[in-house]
Image: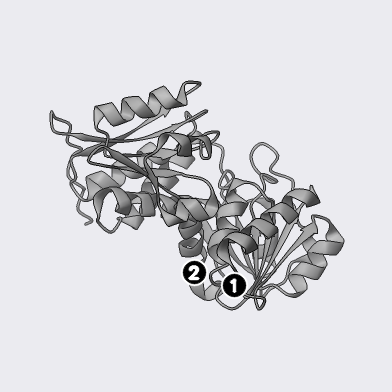
């Protein structure tokens, strides 16, 4: 019989980690991180705070309270950088912060989204391979920046081509990529998709297409998917989007956005505690929280 984790401890010495953003009521990060703290018997608790305005005052308050660290979600991943004391290379590369460490009163910003993506899909699925990324927003930025260290070729497809072009130029400029690494911007349409996928073994959807409640939509026509593709979808509500379902049915490997959420959370946990994250405890808590919402459908991860 599996042993139960120790009870959550709350006392005068309990440390605080938290999430700030707007909105945050839908977040499953509190369940996920509190399960991790509980699994390792750490005297920490995680809460979510909705910050509707006054970001600077909120960050100042967290500093004054001596929080151990905090996560940052939309719409503050970029603007929070103005209120921090230092930035890790990950945040500087990506140009956004999703994790902050309070080191003796010094607030240091990190971005764990890119590492979360790499860990969720497995480095073997991207190293020296072609990658097609759909979208040019925050999630796409993190995926492209981190993947540029491993992939041989990256295609960025977006409905507004100028945004894809700007991201491609920025990544190449900031990372100083050699001419051997090609990053190409293309419009998001069936013709461009077909061309990009011909040279890719990994497809990453970083758009909200297929997210609840528009669960019957997919950014990729079914006929363009292949059995030898690994298909990732940043959406995790529903757990299996139409894109992932259609990919699974033809035998492709599929990974959903919950894995990226769990692993970026695990990277934040390590930054705050210095300990390896209990990923299975975090995954179990995240799944339980999602199922409690009564909305997601499908399996969390499917492999043929």
- Tell me residue 43's x, y (percent): 18, 40
Q: Secondary structure at mark 2?
A: loop
- Tell me residue 283's x, y (percent): 39, 52
Question: Residue at position x 46%, y 59% from top?
Answer: 115
Depth check, mark 1 against mark 2: the one in front is: 1
Q: Is residue 13 above or below residue 137?
A: above
Nearer-the-camera pick, 44 or 293: 44
Any part of residue 285 in sight = yes
- Tell me residue 2's x, y (percent): 23, 56
Question: Residue at position x 54%, y 48% from top?
Answer: 95
Which quadrant would residue 132 be assigned to in this image?
Answer: bottom right
Crowding around mark 2 (Cα neighbors within 10 Å: few <14, some 14 to 19, many 20+) is few
- In this figure, which residue is indicated by the disc labeled 1? 151
- In this figure, which residue is indicated by the disc labeled 2? 122
Q: Quadrant of the N terminus?
A: bottom left
Q: CA distance from mark 1 to mark 2?
A: 12 Å
């Amino acid at each position: 019989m599996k042993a139960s984790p120790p009870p959550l401890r709350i006392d005068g010495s309990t440390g605080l980690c938290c999430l700030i953003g707007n909105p945050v009521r839908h977040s499953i990060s509190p369940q996920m991180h509190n399960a991790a703290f509980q699994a390792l018997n750490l005297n920490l608790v995680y809460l979510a705070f909705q910050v509707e305005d006054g970001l600077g005052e909120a960050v100042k308050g967290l500093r004054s309270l001596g929080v151990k660290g905090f996560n940052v979600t939309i719409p503050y991943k970029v603007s929070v950088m103005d209120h921090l004391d230092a930035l890790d290379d990950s945040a500087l590369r990506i140009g956004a912060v999703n994790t902050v460490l309070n080191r003796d009163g010094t607030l240091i910003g990190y971005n764990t989204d890119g590492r979360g993506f790499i860990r969720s899909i497995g480095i073997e699925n991207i190293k020296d391979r072609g990658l097609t990324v759909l979208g040019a927003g925050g999630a796409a930025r993190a995926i492209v920046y981190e993947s540029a260290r491993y992939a041989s070729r990256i295609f960025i497809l977006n409905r507004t081509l100028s945004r894809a072009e700007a991201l491609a130029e920025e990544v190449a400029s900031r990372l100083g990529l050699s001419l051997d690494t090609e990053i190409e911007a293309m419009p998001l349409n069936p013709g461009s998709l077909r061309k990009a996928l011909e040279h890719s073994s990994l497809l990453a959807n970083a758009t909200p297409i297929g997210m609840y409640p528009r669960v019957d939509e997919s950014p990729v026509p079914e006929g363009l998917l292949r059995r030898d593709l690994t298909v990732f979808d940043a959406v995790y509500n529903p757990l299996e989007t139409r894109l992932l379902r259609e990919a699974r049915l033809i035998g492709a490997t599929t990974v959903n956005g919950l894995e990226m959420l769990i692993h970026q959370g695990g990277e934040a946990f390590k930054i705050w505690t210095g300990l390896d994250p209990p990923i299975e405890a975090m995954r179990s808590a995240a799944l339980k929280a999602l199922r409690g919402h009564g909305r997601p459908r499908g399996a969390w991860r499917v492999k043929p």
